[in-house]
Image: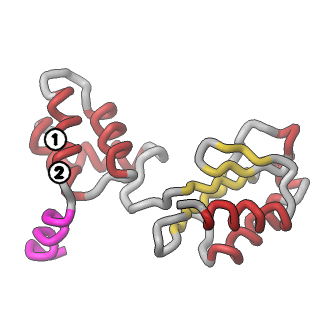
Amino acid sequence: MSNAEAQVVQEEIDLGPANKVIDKYLNMKGALMPVLQEVQDAYGYLPEPCIHLISERLNVYLSQIYGVLTFYAQFHLEPRGKYIVRVCMGTACHVKGAGRIGDTLSELLGIGHAETTEDLKFTVEHVACIGACGMAPVIMVNEATYGSMSVQKMGEIVAKYRAMD
């Protein structure tokens, strides 16, 4: 990205929420993780201008920050959907058809694992385990858990969330 492109991106992001978070932690040692978590909560992901701001204000090398961001799966560098749909691919869910559920979700939304719809409404993630094996196959939409999933139920759930807002 050229400096001109970076400047355009910088102008599009309101750094106010990031500055507010950083202000809370400015004089604390070891504040990088909570700052990254709270800034991500504020934006839904970690925009590059915010990462640069964190680096400058906390006096932490960008390489250190990116090391943390790429090590922990909880951090996201790209915008994510309003609804995060997690499809459990654990053993119990796999045996009971999680693959078909994931395929159906991909067909309905036009995206695959770790992708986000263009309208930023949905992000799909295939996860190792949701921890609800007795309800297999299972998906989660944000914090809501849906068990005993079927292809038909998947269609109903997608329609429900599409209709929201």
Relative image position of residue 58 (x, y in whole percent): 14, 36
> Is 19 left or right of 138, judged from the image as shown?
left
Instruction: Indicate yes or no whether the magenta region holds residue 8.
Output: yes
What residue would you read off at disc 2? 15
- Give yes or no for contact between labels 2 and 1 (Cβ–Cβ under 8 Å): yes
Give the image quarter of residue 4.
Answer: bottom left
Looking at the image, is 58 positioned above or below residue 88? Answer: above
Question: Which residue lies at the image location 21% right of the left edge and 60% below the top edge?
Answer: 13
Classify 40 as above or below 110.
Answer: above
Q: Is residue 65 left or right of residue 45?
A: left
Near-viewer residue (30 or 6):
6
At 52% across and 65% down in the image, what residue appears? Answer: 121
Would you say residue 41 sits in the magenta stretch? Answer: no
Q: Main secondary structure of the magenta part?
A: helix
**Number of marks in the image?**
2
Q: Quick one: quadrant of the N terminus? A: bottom left
- Of helix, strand and loop, which one carries label 1? helix
Taking the spot 15% from the left edge, 31% from the top edge, the residue there is 23
**Other residues around mark 2 within 10 Å, as few (<14) / some (14–19) / many (≥20):** some
Q: In front: 20, or 113? A: 20
Q: At label 1, which amino acid type do we have? A: Asn
Question: In this picture, which residue range is highlighted in magenta?
Answer: 1-12
Tag 2: amino acid: Leu
Left of 91 or right of it: where is 76? left
User: In the image, which disc is placed on residue 19?
Assistant: 1
**Which residue is the extreme one toward the top?**
28
Q: Residue at x 44, y 43 (%)?
A: 72
Asked where in the image residue 106 lies, by quadrant, the reply is bottom right
